[in-house]
């Protein structure tokens, strides 16, 4: 998800929508195959829950691994995907933030990117998948960042139907973020941001009242910068967009962006340049490179600094 995606990928939303009764993607075209993807899971031990001091830390103290256009994945048959695997696999591999695009088809909200012909899933189905994971893992905190073209009321209905609405954390923009232990104790472990309709119901947060971001329209590694794109400089959370689009995502581009030498320096330099901790690190094809391991090591270093400062 780029909240405001490049026109080159917008091919006409809803012209071939599936029936709402469809419980999964069901694209009418054969999947575009992406070669060279290992089906092996990311090694255990790189999820935030295993970090030292995880429970004592604040939500804003962790650099969360986020998948860009998380719903668009090769394994489930999406064309021109940004990820290799579905949402559940992503969460099992330690991803804790999902960027999702929401559009309307036949008066119902769907997850899709650019065009329904490239892949689609009812929003309720995607949310139910997330809820099922959270039911099995009572210690996880998950963040959703929506690029939303659906009415807030429709989105709210999908959250209620999926069972996720009961887990929504509610945050005031002027208040400090709670400790992880507090969110777990109250079972308010889902943080929801949207670029449209934020504030129309409790827990539905306007992303640009809480976050700022770096630019997302980057074609090559040399063009990565920390220049602020959207969101006020005073906003407490930073989205570090770290993916390449030329003109669409690809494994080759992800391997360059996710290379240890590139991502490590971006993480280490971010706070020095922006005066903001990289709260959300958004990537394509997260399994490329050592992204989960690298982010885990970065968080472990930060945890050590925070503990020494207490």
Image: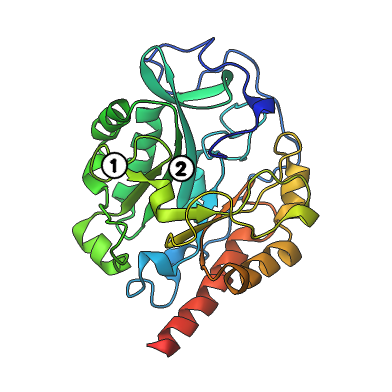
SS for dot 1:
loop
Q: Seen in the image, is 184 located left or right of residue 237?
A: left
Q: Residue at x 43, y 24 (%)?
A: 110
Within 10 Å of disc 1 (Cα), the crowding (few <14, some 14-19, many 20+) is some
Q: Residue at x 27, y 52 (%)?
A: 169
Within 10 Å of disc 2 (Cα), the crowding (few <14, some 14-19, many 20+) is some
Q: Residue at x 34, y 26 (%)?
A: 151
Quarter-of-image position of residue 297 = bottom right
| Quadrant of the image containing the N terminus | top right
Q: Seen in the image, is 44 located left or right of residue 243?
A: left
Q: Residue at x 25, y 48 (%)?
A: 167
Q: Quick check: 308 above or below 68?
A: below
Q: Quick check: 265 above or below 2?
A: below
Residue 96 in the image: x percent, y percent?
45, 53
SS for dot 2:
helix
Q: How many marks?
A: 2
Say which mark, if any, is on residue 286: none
Say which mark, if any, is on residue 88: 2
Query: Label 2 vs label 1: CA separation?
Result: 28 Å
Mark 2 / mark 1, whichever is N-terminal: 2
**Nearest to the observer: residue 262 or residue 49:** 262
Q: Which residue carries the number 1 mark?
A: 199
């Amino acid at each position: 998800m780029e909240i405001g995606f490049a026109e080159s990928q917008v091919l006409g939303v809803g012209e071939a929508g599936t029936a709402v009764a469809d419980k999964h993607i069901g694209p009418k075209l054969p999947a575009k195959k992406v070669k060279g993807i290992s089906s092996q899971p990311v090694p255990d031990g790189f999820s935030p829950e295993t970090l030292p001091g995880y429970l004592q830390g604040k939500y804003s103290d962790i650099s969360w691994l986020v998948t860009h256009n998380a719903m668009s994945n090769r394994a489930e048959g999406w064309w021109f995907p940004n990820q290799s695997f579905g949402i559940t696999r992503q969460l099992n591999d330690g991803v804790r933030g999902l960027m999702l695009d929401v559009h309307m088809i036949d008066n119902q909200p769907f997850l899709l990117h650019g065009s329904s012909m490239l892949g689609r899933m009812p929003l309720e189905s995607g949310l139910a998948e997330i809820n099922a994971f959270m039911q099995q893992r009572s210690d996880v905190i998950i963040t959703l960042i929506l690029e939303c073209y659906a009415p807030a009321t429709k989105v709210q209905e999908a959250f209620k139907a999926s069972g996720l609405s009961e887990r929504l954390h509610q945050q005031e923009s002027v208040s400090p973020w709670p400790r992880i232990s507090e969110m777990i104790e109250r079972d308010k472990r889902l943080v929801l941001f949207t670029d449209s309709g934020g504030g129309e119901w409790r827990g539905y947060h306007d992303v640009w009242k809480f976050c700022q971001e770096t630019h997302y329209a980057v074609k090559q590694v040399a063009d990565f910068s920390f220049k602020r794109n959207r969101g006020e400089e005073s906003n407490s959370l930073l989205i570090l967009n770290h993916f390449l689009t030329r003109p669409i995502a690809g494994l080759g581009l992800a391997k360059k962006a996710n290379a240890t030498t590139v991502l490590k320096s971006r993480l280490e330099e971010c706070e020095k340049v922006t005066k903001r901790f990289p709260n959300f690190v958004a990537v394509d094809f997260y399994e490329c490179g050592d992204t989960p391991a690298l982010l885990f090591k970065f968080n472990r270093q930060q945890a050590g600094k925070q503990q020494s400062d207490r």
